[in-house]
Amino acid sequence: MESDPTPTVVLHACLGVGHLIPMVELAKLLLRRGLAVVIAVPTPPASTADFFSSSASAVDRLAAANPSISFHRLSPPEYPDPDPDAFLQMLDTMRLTVPSLVAFLRTIPSVAALVLDLFCIDALDAAAAAGVPAYLYYTSAAGDLAAFLHLPHYFATTMDGVSFKDMGKTLLRFPGVPPIPASDMPHTVLDRADRTFSLRIGHYRRMPEARGVLINTYQWLEARAVAALREGVCVPNRPTPPVYCIGPLIVKGEETAKGERHPCLSWLDAQPERSVVFLCFGSMGAVSVEQLKEIALGLESSGHRFLWVVRSPPQDPAKFFLPRPESDLGVLLPEGFMERTRDRGIVVGSWAPQVDVLRHAATGAFVTHCGWNSVLEAASAGVPMVCWPQYAEQRLNKVFVVEEMRLGVVMDGYDEELVKADEVEKKVRLVMDSVEGNKLRERLAMAKEMAAEALSDGESSSLAFTEFLKDLKFANSPNNQTVVL
Ligand code: UDP
């Protein structure tokens, strides 16, 4: 007699390195619990292949590094007239991919659930069409989710036709999060006349349709936001699905995964404990040539050791998300900078093994763009942050890291044309040398301990994951009867 096929969880990812990485970590967790997993990724339509090419190659890299996880590339949708805006191209691609996802779901004998990335909300329709339970996997802060879920109500009741872009630094008050300056809201919701605005508000309105929401965070880090989500106060007049804080799900480190060592780690080995400032702006972030020069001057006059990842600035701001050539450091940095700082700093073009760097004993501070994976990685490694948000929801994350979690300080001028060298020097000295820096380190030591604890058996994130699995069983049992695990 043939045994029943192993229940399969289909994870539907969007093409973005910062989204794919935590999706792979979730896949590993599900595999360890005996479920089959497929990560279904969109294939870029021919008309947008340029924009997606770096993320598409990230899928190849991740698939090669994780042979136990199966990746399925959904067929590319027709998208003859792509929106000129790269972010909208991504959202349109995800929406147009829904039919291909439905077709794929129907080929799998036993789908236990469809788990959606936060940019794949339209795929709720795919789950409904295929008759499978749908969960959302929120790969940014619970605080972001609390604020975003509240936005449809906020705009309907409070804003009176005004847009955030016209409110300057007016403080916005949402349940579960500290006051947020309107100018720190993501650009996608700043202007109610934009197409991105209506699409994103539509997504936030639909999010509660998911059966449950997995969040890559941990209870201690965002207790207030998590409580607001659980109490249902973020989405008034409508039930909020259960939330499961299962993080921090972060990579183990390049060293472990590939068995080879990046040269910057050998350089770190030779530096004193907690002496190095690490600067890195995520998988896409880059600053102008003028800004690179200010950073270089600030680092030089701080007198501290540094490890700096420099990515080539985009020639054209509209092409910010397009892949860029390897940085020509000789041209980008001030003349003589590399020679003058040779004994105490290194600059890496494009990519460093961030998790390994943050965990290295020599690393003392992290200048970060506040992408959520970076925040989790820093918190888990106990490294204080200097927050320099660049795009997406990073300004919101900056508010939470500084005001709520108290794990970092702000690089002032992040919202102006240029952060001056003086400010770079000042903030590096603050986190590395001062009493305030020491206090931050103490708090980070706690964040690190609590991150490890959350994931251990019987603790918050591990329990939340078990609760999620129970719900999954319940959703898949005949007549929704509770099934013993
Ligand atoms: N990352 C890395 N080396 C780099 C740049 C980025 O390892 O030089 C990794 C980083 O550790 C994190 C991810 O890429 O896991 C970036 O995700 P995040 O959410 O921080 O930012 P995003 O790239 O999505 O803006």
Image (cartoon, rainbow, N blue to C red):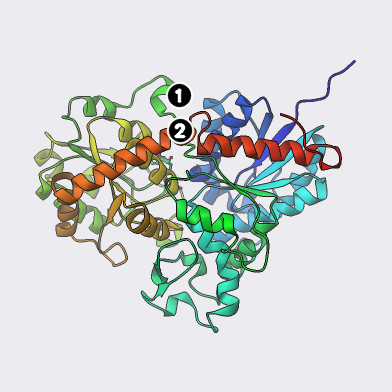
Q: CA distance from mark 1 to mark 2?
A: 9 Å
- Residue at horizontal 78%, vertical 44%? 132
Q: Which quarter of the figure has residue 287?
A: bottom left
Asked if residue 27 can be seen in this view, the reply is yes
Q: Which quarter of the figure has residue 199?
A: bottom right
The answer to whether 189 appears left or right of 442 in the picture is right
Residue wearing tag 2: 251
The amino acid type of the residue labelled 1 equals: Ala
Q: Nearer the viewer, mark 1 or mark 2?
A: 2
Q: Position of residue 354 (x, y in %)?
A: 36, 36
Question: SS class of the residue under badge 1?
Answer: helix
Q: Residues within 10 Å of mark 1 (few under 14, many from 20)?
A: few
> Quarter of the image containing the C terminus?
top right
Mark 1–mark 2 CB contact (< 8 Å)? yes
Q: Position of residue 134 (x, y in %)?
A: 71, 47
Q: Position of residue 48 (x, y in %)?
A: 59, 53
The answer to whether 292 appears left or right of 168 in the picture is left
Which quadrant of the figure shows ligand 1? top left
Q: Classify 366 as above or below 458.
A: below
Residue wearing tag 1: 257
Q: Which quarter of the figure has residue 317?
A: bottom left
